[in-house]
Amino acid sequence: MRSKILTMAVVVLAVTAGLSSAAAAMPGPANTTVTIRAQGTDLSGVVSSPAPLRCSQNRRVDVYKQIGTRGGGNDIRFANDTASLQGNAYKWSTGNTGTPGRFYAKVWPKTGCRGDTSVTIQVVNT
């Protein structure tokens, strides 16, 4: 009886160790990068990732108008678009907003993908 209990304990420990090492070997969420640029008041950019089908394709991009200090809690979600494959990149565009100011783009984390926030750019009417 004692040898059966000992054998079961060894099996349980082996299975638990195997699960722990398998979990440790699993990769974390894939990096994601979002960019922003302006041509006049037309805002656009690219979403890129080493896992593009999961993390770039159809990824929602929120564009924020920066009010005061970035991240101060008073920035306004101004526009959004969904990244789609155009050529060899997943691009997004708001079209012509007609609004000058400071703007940045953000993609939120999602299952298997990290989020990212672009630099802030200054947009002027041309």
Image (cartoon, rainbow, N blue to C red):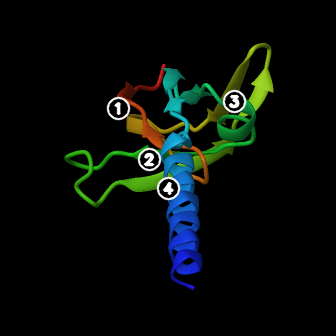
Instruction: Determine crowd level at label 1: few under 14, some 14-19, many 20+ residues with C-alpha closer than 10 A.
Output: some
**In front: 14, or 66?**
14
Q: Amino acid at mark 3?
A: Pro
Q: Amino acid at mark 4?
A: Ala
Q: Position of residue 110 (x, y in %)?
A: 58, 53
In percent of the image, x 29 and y 60: which residue is there? 74
**In front: 2, or 50?**
2
Q: Earlier in the sequence, mark 1 or mark 3?
A: 3
Instruction: Determine crowd level at label 3: few under 14, some 14-19, many 20+ residues with C-alpha closer than 10 A.
Output: some
Mark 1–mark 2 Cα distance, whole angstroms, equals 9 Å
Q: Amino acid at mark 1?
A: Thr
Q: Earlier in the sequence, mark 4 or mark 1?
A: 4
Q: Earlier in the sequence, mark 4 or mark 3?
A: 4
Q: Position of residue 6 (x, y in %)?
A: 50, 73
Instruction: Determine crowd level at label 2: few under 14, some 14-19, many 20+ residues with C-alpha closer than 10 A.
Output: some
Q: Amino acid at mark 2?
A: Tyr
- Numbered tag placed on residue 52 in the rendering: 3
